[in-house]
Image (tube, rainbow, N blue to C red):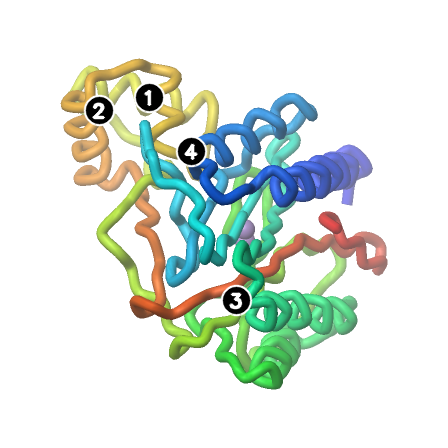
Amino acid sequence: MEKEEFDCYLKAGKIATKVKANARKHAKVGMTLFDLAEGIEEEIIEEGGRPAFPVNLSANNVAAHYTPKINDELEIRENDVLKIDIGVHVEGFIADCACTVDFSGKNQKLVEASEKALENALTLVKPGLEIGKIGEEIEKTIKSFGFNPVYNLSGHGLAKYETHAFPTIPNHANKDSKVLEDEMAFAIEPFATDGQGHVMEGNEVEIFSMQAPQNCRGQTARKILALVEKEYRTLPFAERWIQKELNLSEFERKIALKELMQRGILHQYPILHEQKGKLVSQAETSIIINNGEVKILVE
Ligand code: MN
Ligand code: MN
């Protein structure tokens, strides 16, 4: 891997490490998720990075893809199990990480299950390791705590301006015999749950990404497209980011996003949730293998 590229990954990882630690400290019961997310995203920029995707703040049975809406008043509640998932990029090179905060202290075992699964998986990582072995270790560890891994969520490769690249890193023993190779960058992200371990798509969508740029008719849609191509490229973005930059009426924004979706220009990421009343924890870090050496990007 080119030194410049490696250095970008290291810088993204350093920023993510610092920002994640601060987010953990700042998150308090009564605080709005909006303020938490915007604070994290601002800090990433102050530190010299860019958010690789909107901060995901998914509580309780929501496993992923919740980012605050425009004027979202949702607050952190005392029994919340909150996943804070942060992505930082430097010149398109991404460090993706997450932690879980258990505000009541009643769900420590669940939090520990995903953390330990990540820790155990990391001890195996080296060039030549069968990718299925990572999933096997994660599943075994989470089950030893009495929980289920979320079978249909997985870690993923990282590439320039691409959050979900080859290969898929499973959270269960799927017997994948592909192997980790030199120059690979990827995220491992075990999810543990007291539910069945299968997340479903909800109706809410706040996160989008460019999938297939092409011409569109609406003036507002064209404005959004130009902003996305310039600022986010193929990385995910939030509706509240668009609003901050373009200051549109809700009506024109919704119509424009709908047009972009219908034409297949934008991809949407609906929230992903376990069954009601169940809880999900997550731990995540990013790894890069360079000249045969394993470097964990986010501590
Ligand atoms: Mn993540
Ligand atoms: Mn990830």
Q: Secondary structure at mark 4?
A: helix
Q: Secondary structure at mark 2?
A: helix
Residue sitting at x 64%, y 69%: 112
Q: Earlier in the sequence, mark 1 or mark 2?
A: 1
Q: Position of residue 235 (x, y in %)?
A: 47, 37
Query: Quick one: label 4, few (<14), some, or many (20+) residues within 10 Å?
Result: many
Q: Earlier in the sequence, mark 1 or mark 3?
A: 3
- Above or below, comparing residue 204 to residue 46 in the picture: below
- The residue identified by callout 3 is 191
Of 253 and 127, the residue lying toward us:
253
Specify whether tag 4 is near ligand 1 (CB below 8 Å): no
Query: Quick one: label 2, few (<14), some, or many (20+) residues within 10 Å?
Result: some
- The residue identified by callout 1 is 243
Q: Position of residue 51 (x, y in %)?
A: 55, 33
Q: Tell me whether the residue at label 1 lies in contact with that at label 3, contact meaning CB atoms closer than 8 angstroms.
A: no
Nearest-to-viewer mark from 3 and 4: 4
Report the amino acid beneath label 1: Gln
Q: Tell me whether the residue at label 1 lies in contact with that at label 2, contact meaning CB atoms closer than 8 angstroms.
A: yes
- The residue identified by callout 4 is 34
Residue sitting at x 52%, y 71%: 192
Q: Quote the CA–CA distance across marks 3 and 2.
A: 34 Å
Report the amino acid beneath label 4: Phe
Of 204 and 96, the residue lying toward us:
204
Q: Quote the CA–CA distance across marks 4 and 2.
A: 19 Å
